[in-house]
């Protein structure tokens, strides 16, 4: 038995609106990205019916299996890649996603350039930042972000529209959110993708323009 999604979508949407207003921000500047890894197609359609317009997937293969048919019937929906992208999956990913939030290596940037040179219109791109400087985590180290972003722009002609991060687990995320927002401002970018089910309200307070909420909408996951 599935819970109706309309309630959780409404609650998350309201929380985002309140947090934005309390911070003196326009709620329209914060986009809810429903993190839908492991969520089957019928639940995706329920979420679309409940008003979700943007979804984030972690795995190219899973997204390629689930989304083409759903999107054919719901053409307004936007799809973001929020998980790691290996270069050998890039040519599939650039055709499938509207936004790739996980650009974090020069090698991947070069692969994207080759896709573009082959005539593909690239998705919009965010640079993933390893904001907690955790050895096991993906993302560009904070000290290298400016160089990486400028190199993507100037050497490769890639336009990056923002930064994304996943702060260390089990710590107060606030300092990490603040730091990412400052870097975004410094680099003159529009977007900060930060905040998940447990901390999206804080993220909105500190400048998030995209929050990635999974279990808070779809309930618990059994895997990944
Ligand atoms: C799964 C996932 C989320 C959402 O996590 P929840 O805690 O379920 O909201 C957000 N971002 C990324 C990158 C994820 O993999």
Image (cartoon, grey):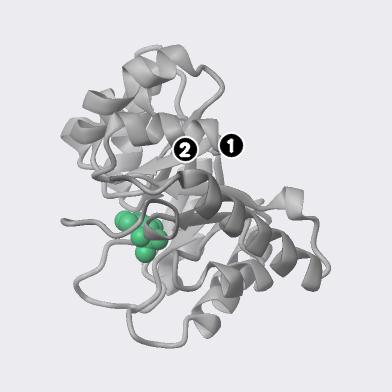
Residue 162 in view of the camera: no
Seen from the viewer's position, the closer of residues 130 and 74 is 74
Marking on residue 51 = 1
**How many dots with numbers?**
2
| Quadrant into which the C terminus falls | bottom left
| 42 horizontally vs 14: left or right | left
Residue at image point 59% right, 58% down: 11
Task: Give the image quarter of residue 142.
Answer: bottom left
| 203 horizontally vs 147: left or right | right
Image height check: is 183 above or below 28? below
Counting from the top left corner in percent of width and height, residue 5 is at 46, 45
Counting from the top left corner in percent of width and height, residue 50 is at 55, 37
| Quadrant into which the N terminus falls | top left
Task: Give the image quarter of residue 24.
Answer: bottom right
Image height check: is 224 above or below 199? above
Residue at image point 64% right, 64% down: 15
Question: Badge 1: few (under 14), some or many (20 or more) residues near its Cα, within 10 Å?
Answer: some
Q: Are marks 2 and 1 in contact (CB under 8 Å)?
A: no
Q: Disc 2 marks which residue?
A: 47
Seen from the viewer's position, the closer of residues 214 and 8 is 8
Seen from the viewer's position, the closer of residues 40 and 195 is 40
């Amino acid at each position: 038995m599935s819970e109706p999604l309309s309630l959780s979508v409404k609650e998350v949407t309201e929380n985002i609106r309140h947090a934005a207003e309390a911070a003196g921000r326009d709620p329209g500047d914060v986009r809810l990205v429903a993190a839908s890894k492991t969520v089957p197609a019928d639940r995706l359609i329920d979420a679309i019916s409940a008003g979700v317009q943007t979804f984030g997937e972690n795995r190219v293969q899973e997204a390629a299996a689930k989304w083409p048919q759903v999107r054919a019937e719901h053409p307004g929906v936007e799809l973001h890649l929020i998980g790691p992208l290996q270069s050998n999956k890039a040519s599939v990913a650039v055709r499938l996603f509207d936004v790739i939030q996980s650009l974090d290596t020069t090698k991947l940037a070069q692969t994207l350039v080759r896709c573009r040179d082959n005539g593909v219109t690239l998705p919009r791109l965010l640079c993933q930042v390893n904001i907690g400087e955790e050895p096991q985590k993906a993302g560009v180290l904070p000290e290298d972000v400016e160089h990486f972003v400028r190199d993507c722009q100037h050497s490769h002609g890639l336009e990056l529209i923002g930064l994304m991060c996943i702060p260390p687990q089990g710590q107060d995320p606030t300092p990490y959110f603040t730091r990412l927002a400052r870097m975004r401002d410094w680099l003159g970018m529009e977007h900060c993708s930060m905040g998940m089910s447990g901390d999206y309200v804080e993220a909105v307070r500190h400048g998030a323009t995209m929050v990635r909420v999974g279990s808070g909408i779809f309930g618990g996951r059994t895997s990944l």
